[in-house]
Amino acid sequence: MNGVVAFFDALRANPWAYPALESVHIVGIALLLGNLVALEVRVFGGAAALPVPALARLSLRIAAVGFGLAAVSGLLMFATQPSELLGNRSFVIKMGLLATAGCNAALFHARGSLHKLDLTARVQMLVSTAIWIGVVVCGRWIAY
């Protein structure tokens, strides 16, 4: 346990660590949101020459990598100041939106929405993008 505490103390003390984590976090968000929006644009008729299944395989893999980067860097940033973040309304809202995004994604894939691309699937995609934009906005408000 002392090693873990020392690690997080070092993260807090190092002037480069937190900005580096923030940078990784932003890159992860960009990969996640950018690829979800690219897939959504295709589903709504843009870049019609691209087959949806192939684009979805690529986009969702890159989005998953982005989520992983954002999640790991976010957890490390959280661990450096948990009490301050838990007391921050924007952080709490962001966590609620992340849970909602996860539920929406689980429902989307459970119902096979990517293969149906019906009205429900399209609404779910729009809702997903709106939720992720809310996550980004709340993330920026955490600092203020």
Image (tube, rainbow, N blue to C red):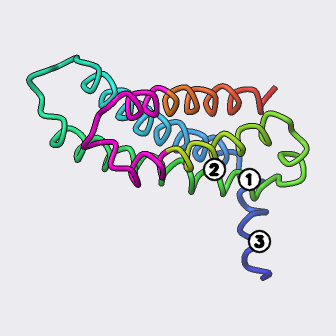
- Quote the CA–CA distance across marks 1 and 3: 15 Å
Mark number displayed over residue 70: none
Q: Dot 2, crowdedness within 10 Å: few (<14), some or many (≥20)? A: some
Q: Is residue 138 magenta?
A: no
Residue at 12 percent of width and 34 percent of height = 51
Q: Tell me if mark 3 has few (under 14), some (14-19) or many (20+) residues whose alpha carbon lies within 10 angstroms of its own.
A: few
- Residue type, label 2: Gly
Q: Which of 137 and 21 is in front in this view?
A: 137
Magenta stretch prevailing secondary structure: helix
Residue extending farthest to the left is: 49
Range of magenta residues? 105-126
Q: Mark 1 points at which residue?
A: 78
Q: Is residue 15 placed above or below 121 in the rendered structure?
A: below
State the residue in front, 34 or 2: 34
- Give the image quarter of residue 113: top left
Crowding at dot 1, Cα within 10 Å, few <14 / some 14-19 / many 20+, comes out as some
Asked if the residues shown at circle 2 and circle 1 are in contact, with their CB atoms under 8 angstroms apart, the answer is yes
Identity of the amino acid at label 3? Ala
Among the two numbered marks 2 and 3 on one chain, the one whose residue lies closer to the N terminus: 3
Q: Inspect the image, locate mark 1, and give the three-letter code of the amino acid beneath it.
A: Phe
Q: Is residue 79 left or right of residue 119?
A: right
Q: In this view, does 51 lie to the left or right of 34?
A: left
In the rendered image, the vertical position of residue 115 relative to residue 78, given as above or below: above
Q: Mark 3 or mark 1, which is nearer the start of the sequence?
A: 3
Furthest residue to the top? 46
Residue depicted at x 47% and y 47%:
105
Q: For marks 1 and 3, give the one nearer the viewer.
A: 1
Determine which quarter of the picture holds residue 136.
top right
The residue under label 3 is 6
- Residues tagged 2 and 3 counted as in contact (Cβ below 8 A): no
Near-viewer residue (38 or 7): 38
